[in-house]
Image (tube, helix red, strand yellow):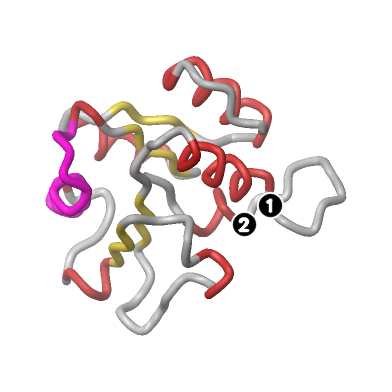
Amino acid sequence: MVDFGGVLTDHGDEAVSEPPLVGVLREARRHGLRTALLSNADGLWTPPTEWDDLFDVVVTSGETGFGKPDERIYLLTAEKLGLEPGECVFVDDLAINVRGAAACGMVGVHHTSVRDTLGELEALLEIPLTG
């Protein structure tokens, strides 16, 4: 599971047109991983159409009526993915949201840089994510 603002919008230190973690999601899906976008956006927001193939599930707080760091939104997202919380890795740029995910049994990754997040995800998932 990933957050939109601050994670998928982070272009890192490289001058690239597409944020690097978008490519990481594509690679994760090539390895058969299920992915979700979890955002505190209002109910009218949807991800860009060019990302339609990136996510099995999109959950927004506007749609559910509750948001991060409320444990219910993490549990709902895991349920929609067909996974137990302990099978999920959640990435967010806000530590409070990562703690919320960890409190319900998920592995949390606090996104502070593209390089660090990529390294953590490759170690946790034991797959190469850079294509």
The residues tagged by marks 2 and 1 sit, at their Cα atoms, a distance apart of 6 Å
Image coordinates of residue 46 in percent, x first then y, are 42, 75
Along the horizontal axis of the image, is 48 left or right of 114?
Answer: left
Q: Are marks 2 and 1 in contact (CB under 8 Å)?
A: yes
Above or below for 37 versus 121 = below
Q: Is residue 84 magenta?
A: yes
Image coordinates of residue 128 in percent, x first then y, are 58, 23
**Residues in magenta, as a range:** 72-85
Above or below for 87 versus 95 = above
Question: Earlier along the polypeptide chain: callout 2 or callout 1?
Answer: 2
View extreme (bottom): residue: 44
Residue corresponding to mark 1: 19
- Total labels drawn: 2
Q: Amino acid at mark 1?
A: Pro
Q: Amino acid at mark 2?
A: Thr
Q: Nearer the viewer, mark 2 or mark 1?
A: 1
Above or below for 24 versus 119 = below
Image coordinates of residue 3 in percent, x first then y, are 44, 52
Along the horizontal axis of the image, is 74 left or right of 128?
Answer: left
Q: Quadrant of residue 106?
A: top left
Residue corresponding to mark 2: 9
Along the horizontal axis of the image, is 49 left or right of 32?
Answer: right
SS of the residue under disc 2: loop
Decide which of 65, 96 is in the foreground and name it: 65
Please give the name of the residue rendered at 43% of the width and 22% of the height, measured from the top-left corner. 125
Identify the image quadrant of the N terminus.
top left
Above or below for 119 versus 110 = above
Magenta stretch, overall SS:
helix
Please give the name of the residue rendered at 46% of the width and 42% of the height, measured from the top-left corner. 29
Q: Residues within 10 Å of mark 1 (few under 14, many from 20)?
A: some
